[in-house]
Amino acid sequence: MEYDNNRPFSSEGAGQGLKRNSGLGKGIVIGVLATLMVVIIGLSSVITAFIRKGYIHIGTRGQVYVQDIGVTDDEGIGSKIEGKLNALDSLLENGFYFDDVDDEKAAENIFKAYLAAYGDKYTVYYTPEEYKSLMESTSGTFYGIGAVCQKAEDGSILVTEAYEDAPAYKAGIRNGDRVIEVNGQDIRGMDLSVGVALIKGEKGTEVNLTVVRGDETLKFTVTRDKINVKTVASRVLDNNIGYIYISQFDDVTTGQFKSALDELQGHGITGLVIDIRNNPGGVLTTVVDMLDYILPNGLIVYTETKSGKKQEYTGYDNHEVNIPIAVLVNGNSASASEIFAGAMQDYGKAQIIGTQTFGKGIVQTIRQLTDGSAVKYTVAKYFTPKGQDIHGKGVTPDQTVEIPENATEDVQLNAATEYLKGKMSVSAGK
């Protein structure tokens, strides 16, 4: 077959073939694009539905939060009471005499009241701001007034330790003071962490505190500042006895404790007092790590859920403190403090001296919701290595020592040092 090189190659049959191939290609492209559009529309519908349900939340800075618990689920008690709440809102909207209601605050109070209805004072709702403050409080660094606090029986916030170089102490607040109002707001019905969150704030801002001291009611204005929490204090006592005070179990406490103990051992101590009186507790993993450092390898504490599921926390670092130890406790030693005292007692590692501890033997977990708020709720009960159930009972001291009224000396610390001197003399005679 011959063809002319100066003329384009073409024929009727070849042209028809090209047209058919071009049409097929366009059809494939259109099909792929159509499929992609269907997938995109489907995904958009799912994402939109999840956002409406509260399973996906877009933060103010563009952060995307995804979780299995929504904040606007249409199932459960919310769907039952929504209509009545709207009716109440409509009823008061135009006829309520006083100032307009803060809808956001009203909603927060509803959430708090609902969780309070469960009857567990440790199950609480946190606003986004309260949750942020709570997380700061366990990190070891925050902005506030510089005081260790716990809940008093009357609902006020008891100052158990005002750091001497911090704003609270400089303003005149002292150990034993009870805070009843923060910026004019009564905090006696609040969860401890919520009340403390009100006291904290940005560096340089002021907070007004109403405090009860004995029969007096005093008012203080405190300027907030950066607080580097010192949870451990130590010194060497007479007779070569080391003393370590632990105010709470925060993320920073394990490192501070090990440093303090190393320093004391560098001074050649032959006995040790660990003081956890007035320690309200703290982070479970912190107390486990500290006990792992002190005790021989083995079970430290275990938790058990309502369904009977157990989780064990075991020491395995091959480190052990091998000098006589006394642990001081009282009625304000709670939660992680009781885990500490109970484990030391079960292993026979220390003499527990003082008075019956608080009796908080339950474990809470915190779940953040997609809008930045969070819920702390009770999930399990904990038990000491030998199975002591502490909740509602507390740890019973090996040696009960009450502090008499108008005491002029620390009789519990004296009892601890006397115990240690006896143990140290026996060790020296071996």
Image (cartoon, helix red, strand yellow):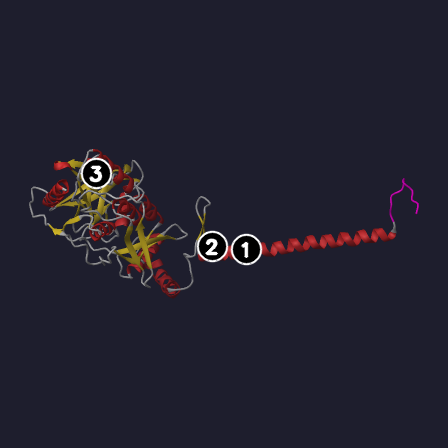
SS under mark 1:
helix
Q: Pointer 2: what residue?
A: 51
The x and y percentages for residue 331 are 16, 51
Q: Nearer the viewer, residue 233 or 211?
A: 233
The x and y percentages for residue 170 are 20, 35
Which quadrant holds the C terminus?
top left
Of badges 2 and 1, the one in the foreground is 1
| Residue at screen point 16% across, 36% down | 236
Q: Check residue 233 in the rendering and tell me which mark sits there, or answer none.
A: 3
The x and y percentages for residue 317 are 31, 45
Crowd tier of the residue under label 3, counting other residues whose Cα lies within 10 Å: few below 14, some 14–19, many 20 or above: some
Q: Nearer the viewer, residue 277 or 129?
A: 277
Q: Is residue 26 left or right of residue 37?
A: right
At label 3, the amino acid type is: Ala
Q: Please count the marks in the image.
A: 3
Q: Is residue 334 left or right of residue 202?
A: left
* Dominant secondary structure (helix, strand or loop) of the stretch shown in magenta: loop
Q: CA distance from mark 2 to mark 1?
A: 12 Å
The x and y percentages for residue 222 are 23, 38
At label 2, the amino acid type is: Ile
Q: CA distance from mark 1 to mark 3?
A: 56 Å
Of badges 3 and 2, the one in the foreground is 3
Magenta region includes residue 120: no
SS under mark 3:
strand
Q: Earlier in the sequence, mark 1 or mark 3?
A: 1
| Residue at screen point 29% across, 55% down | 302
Segment tinted magenta in the rendering: 1-10
Height in image: 393 above or below 204? below
Q: Pointer 1: what residue?
A: 43
Q: Earlier in the sequence, mark 3 or mark 2?
A: 2
Of badges 1 and 3, the one in the foreground is 3
